[in-house]
Amino acid sequence: MTTPPPAASTAPSPSASAAPPTGHLLSVRAVGKSYPRAGAVLDGVDLSVARGGTVGLVGESGSGKSTLARLVLGLAAPDTGAVRFDGQDPYRLRGRASRSVRARLQFVPQNPRGSLNPALRAGSAVGFVLAAQRTPRAERTELTAELFRQVGLDPALARRFPRELSGGQVQRVAIARALATGPDLVVCDEPTSALDRGVQAQVLDLLTELQQTRGLAYLFISHDLAVVRHLAHRVSVLRHGRVVEEGPADQVWDHPQHPYTRALLAASTGRTPPPAPNH
Ligand SMILES: Nc1ncnc2c1ncn2[C@@H]1O[C@H](COP(=O)(O)OP(=O)(O)OP(=O)(O)O)[C@@H](O)[C@H]1O
């Protein structure tokens, strides 16, 4: 399915702003993963995310994006290669070290409504995370209100149930929940693909703003190059489990080298780029 590019935004293009700080927070090296029926889902994948930077991971459905997200989050182990978050293997950690890394490594899902308990008020979704972080009960309500404000939500909405919120509001609650642990890296898996175009642009602007104020890094997964271009500093293009192109977002957008990247661009924008010199 082709999602239209997001509406024009007031947020500065990340690639037009200052370069992100150097030093890799996340490093994926020669990662391979197979499943019995699917075969090789990832094959020799390399990817790095700098502190405070955004890498966009694009590819069609089935290219292996969510599998890579699971490996990065330490929910599964690669068959070959290595995943390192700040030098540590998120899958192998146990006990306090695991809790610390899990707090610094958060996730925003595609379908936040599905990840929120429908029987609990929106504020509780954030409150539970704060409780797990051992935040004193007396501070949780005010901290939840502050997180709601940071994601552009009226703190009064914390009293509502998920069904009483719009799709964009629910996604903001999911972002507030991810922020509650004070992460350094947030893995966003198609976080705007279920939203209307205008709301999509607002959520992307919010993610950009949060990056600037909190120094967050993102691994931003999408099938849509136009969405990724909106906030990524660098882009990796995944096809059948292999990275076929990687580079600065503007370069990949303006001068896509691989035929597959060019096809993704055409699907995303309707624009057929001029032929690349090497193909
Ligand atoms: N736990 C699993 N067991 C077996 N096969 C799996 C498992 N997880 C993923 N796969 C298979 O791996 C391939 C890649 O799936 P993955 O979800 O990573 O792709 P994707 O690019 O994220 O696609 P989508 O955008 O549709 O989620 C698919 O063929 C899928 O069926």
Image: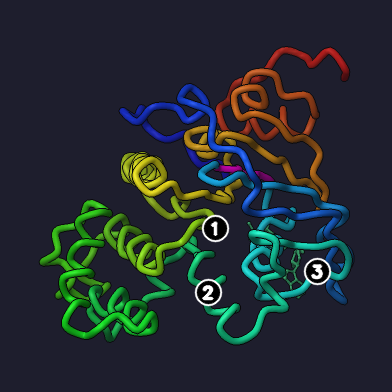
Mark 1: secondary structure:
strand
Q: Residue furthest left?
A: 156
Residue matched to label 2: 100
Q: Earlier in the sequence, mark 2 or mark 3?
A: 3
Residue 214 belongs to magenta span:
no
Residue 157 lies left or right of residue 224; in this view the side is: left
Q: Quadrant of the C terminus?
A: top right
* Front of the two marks 2 and 1: 2
Residue at the (61%, 44%) spot, across then down: 50
**Mark 2 and mark 3 residues within 8 Å of each other at the beta carbon:** no
- Residue type (three-letter) at the residue carrying disc 1: Val
Horizontal and vertical percent position of residue 151: 27, 54
Report the magenta residues as a range: 54-59
Q: Is mark 2 within 8 Å of ligand 1?
A: no
The answer to whether residue 228 is above or below residue 87 is: above
- Residue type (three-letter) at the residue carrying disc 2: Ser
Q: Earlier in the sequence, mark 2 or mark 1?
A: 2
Which colouring convention does the figure follow?
rainbow
How far apart in space, not on screen, are marks 3 and 1 (Cα)?
17 Å
Residue at the (28%, 78%) spot, across then down: 127
Task: Give residue 187's mark.
Answer: 1
The answer to whether residue 20 is above or below residue 103 is: above
Q: Nearer the viewer, residue 25 or 225?
A: 25
Q: Nearer the viewer, residue 258 or 233?
A: 233
Horizontal and vertical percent position of residue 66: 65, 61
Mark 3: secondary structure:
loop
